[in-house]
Image: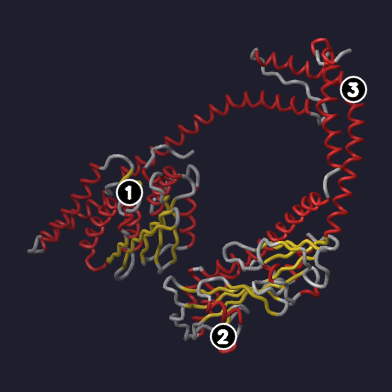
């Protein structure tokens, strides 16, 4: 048999072709690779094993960083807690002890009630500047001459709004100031946890002869699996992020170690470095052992696999023919499955994949049908919400009350200007209600409608209502769904201010926060009790909820239209307290293209 006949595959059966393919495509290349592996240089092996060590070091650094991030996030959470800022405000007067007790019982205690870290492994301290508030709960402590000398307190105040990290004795601390939007200092948050928590993470990746140390920016070792190194200094070249050196940390001859430094980075993270030191001889011995074992396994596997290949070849070809036959039937439109065998080889995987494909084809028919119905249902819901919004543009009670107020002013007053202004504002509202087409308007147009409505209500109720509209000019031309602000203002007057004894105020503020725009309507009216507030919140998110009378019907309509326009990540939220007022917040995307008003509903 010459070389030409050897490669003349048409003269061989399938079994012979597969055997030749195995010999030349698998066995021969693997033997050549094995020969090359025997000649791989020692430096290449060190480099490869060093990469594994680097990855292990990075993983250890990530574990330490994740732990530190938990405490940093917790400190940041308390630092920006609006309610905590409000009750720690130095301007608050707690001269009556009862006021302090109530502040702790109803406000300050619930804020720290969900402190989830075990007191045995972490401790929370909140230092406040209010001279009239009593210390309490083992957490809140008034700032005095002693506290001002605490390193966590002093460093946090010096750092402004930044997170401060440090170590005292056997504890790691993180601290941050509590400040209002103007930067006024209200207090300091301090979290402490034992260094043992870092030690436990470092030990998770602690093989024999490996030294791992966590060093601060000054090169002082904070934690290490070698406990004798804690508190000592490391050479400057080890403290640089990502650096590598053959010199040891302490007490060894140069050239015997591989050292890897990984920085702890991220927002609010300390500028610390995780240093890993591994003996080069240990890396080389392990690499040689792995290489030799791999070659032995390779030779044994090739021999066994060749024997099994020749023995099982007949069964494999029969299964292939059976799969091809089933494919032909599916091609003819018969969605049948190929018989599966309890095996993990490629043919079994191909058979399972084929059966999954057949099942997927069957499901796709039903899925396409169901998706079509879902799109239609979402479109119907959107149109229903828009129809309700159109029907609610002119509240009959508001129209009747306004006309009655105009009539009474014409009768009771010789000066017709107030009545004239009310008629003008009412005509503007009617004109917009009749001429507003489509679902999208600019913020400026919506605010004009709100101003007309507020002016009419101030004429009706005289000095009972005051308002504040704070809208940045750069947001005035942004596109929003129409009638999402006016119904909220109307609710605030009808349910918050009208029922309040004395005068009341309404504030409308629009701000951009990252990729979102936040529209807040605040009133200092009678507020909502907890049970009613829970019911209103539930009605906003309840699927296919039945509409009810009262405040929630307008809120739900606004929420549904925002969700249908932009998706479930946006919508309406409400906060309220009895006799303190109500705040309703609308969140919509700030992206101009998304806010431009695509009529496609979100499914």
Give coordinates of residue 254: x percent, y percent.
80, 67
Label located before the other in sequence (2 or 3): 2
Tag 3, which secondary structure?
Answer: helix
Q: Compared with residue 488, is residue 256 higher up or lower down, i.e. above or below?
A: below
Give coordinates of residue 77: x percent, y percent.
55, 66
On the picture, is 44 further left or further right than 261? Answer: right
Residue at the disc numbered 3: 310
Distance of label 2 from label 3 (alpha carbons): 82 Å
On the picture, is 427 further left or further right than 104? Answer: left
Distance of label 1 from label 3 (alpha carbons): 77 Å
Residue at the disc numbered 1: 483
Q: Compared with residue 507, is residue 285 higher up or lower down, i.e. above or below?
A: above
Label located before the other in sequence (1 or 3): 3
Instruction: Answer whether residue 501 is visible to the viewer in this image.
Output: yes
Residue at the disc numbered 2: 148
Tag 2, which secondary structure?
Answer: helix
Distance of label 2 from label 1 (alpha carbons): 53 Å
The numbered mark at residue 573 is: none
Depth check, mark 2 against mark 3: the one in front is: 3
């Amino acid at each position: 048999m010459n070389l030409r006949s050897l490669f003349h595959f048409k003269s061989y059966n399938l079994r012979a072709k597969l055997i030749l393919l195995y010999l030349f495509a698998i066995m021969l290349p693997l033997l050549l690779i094995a020969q090359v592996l025997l000649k791989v240089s020692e430096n290449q092996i060190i480099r490869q094993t060093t990469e594994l060590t680097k990855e292990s070091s990075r993983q250890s650094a990530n574990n330490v960083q994740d732990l530190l991030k938990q405490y940093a996030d917790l400190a940041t959470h308390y630092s920006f807690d609006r309610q905590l800022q409000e009750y720690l405000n130095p301007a608050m007067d707690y001269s009556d002890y009862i006021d302090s007790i109530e502040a702790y019982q109803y406000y300050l205690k619930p804020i720290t009630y969900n402190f989830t870290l075990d007191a045995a492994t972490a401790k929370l301290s909140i230092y406040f500047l209010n001279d009239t508030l009593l210390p309490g709960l083992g957490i809140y402590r008034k700032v005095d001459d002693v506290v001002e000398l605490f390193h966590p307190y002093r460093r946090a105040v010096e750092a402004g709004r930044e997170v401060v990290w440090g170590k005292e004795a056997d504890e790691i601390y993180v601290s941050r100031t509590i400040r209002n939007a103007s930067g006024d200092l209200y207090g300091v948050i301090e979290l402490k946890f034992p260094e043992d928590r870092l030690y436990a993470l470092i030990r998770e990746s602690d093989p024999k002869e490996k030294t791992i140390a966590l060093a601060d920016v000054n090169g002082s070792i904070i934690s290490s699996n070698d406990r004798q190194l804690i508190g000592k200094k490391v050479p400057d070249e080890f403290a640089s992020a990502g650096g590598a050196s053959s010199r040891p940390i302490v007490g060894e001859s140069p050239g015997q170690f591989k050292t890897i430094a990984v920085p702890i980075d991220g927002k609010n993270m300390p500028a610390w470095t995780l240093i890993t030191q591994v003996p080069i001889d240990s890396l080389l011995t392990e690499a040689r052992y792995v290489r030799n074992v791999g070659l032995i396994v390779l030779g044994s596997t090739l021999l066994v696999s060749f024997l099994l290949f020749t023995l099982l070849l007949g069964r494999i070809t029969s299964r292939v023919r059976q799969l091809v036959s089933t494919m032909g039937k599916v091609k003819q439109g018969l969605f049948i499955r190929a018989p599966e065998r309890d095996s993990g080889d490629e043919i079994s995987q191909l058979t399972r994949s084929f059966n999954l494909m057949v099942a997927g084809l069957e499901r796709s028919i039903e899925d396409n049908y169901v998706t079509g119905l879902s799109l239609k249902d979402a479109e119907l819901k959107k149109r229903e919400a828009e129809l309700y919004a159109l029907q609610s543009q002119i509240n009959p009670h508001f129209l009747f009350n306004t006309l009655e107020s105009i009539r009474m002013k014409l009768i009771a007053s010789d000066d017709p200007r107030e009545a004239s202004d009310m008629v003008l504002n009412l005509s503007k509202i009617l004109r917009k209600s009749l001429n507003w087409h489509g679902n999208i308007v600019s913020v400026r147009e919506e605010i004009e409608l709100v101003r007309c409505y507020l002016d009419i209500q101030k004429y009706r109720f005289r000095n009972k209502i005051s308002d504040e509209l704070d809208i940045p000019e750069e947001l005035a031309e942004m596109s929003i769904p129409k009638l999402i602000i006016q119904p909220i203002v109307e609710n605030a007057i009808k349910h918050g201010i009208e029922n309040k004894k004395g005068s009341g105020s309404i504030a409308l503020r629009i701000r951009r926060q990252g990729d979102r725009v936040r529209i807040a309507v605040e009133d200092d009216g009678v507020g909502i009790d907890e049970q009613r507030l829970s019911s209103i919140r539930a009605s906003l998110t309840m699927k296919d909820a039945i509409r009810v009378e009262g405040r929630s019907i307008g809120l739900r309509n606004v929420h549904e239209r925002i969700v249908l326009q932009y998706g479930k990540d946006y919508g309406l939220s409400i906060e309220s307290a009895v006799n303190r007022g109500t705040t309703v917040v609308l969140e919509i995307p700030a992206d101009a293209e998304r806010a431009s008003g695509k009529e496609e509903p979100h499914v």
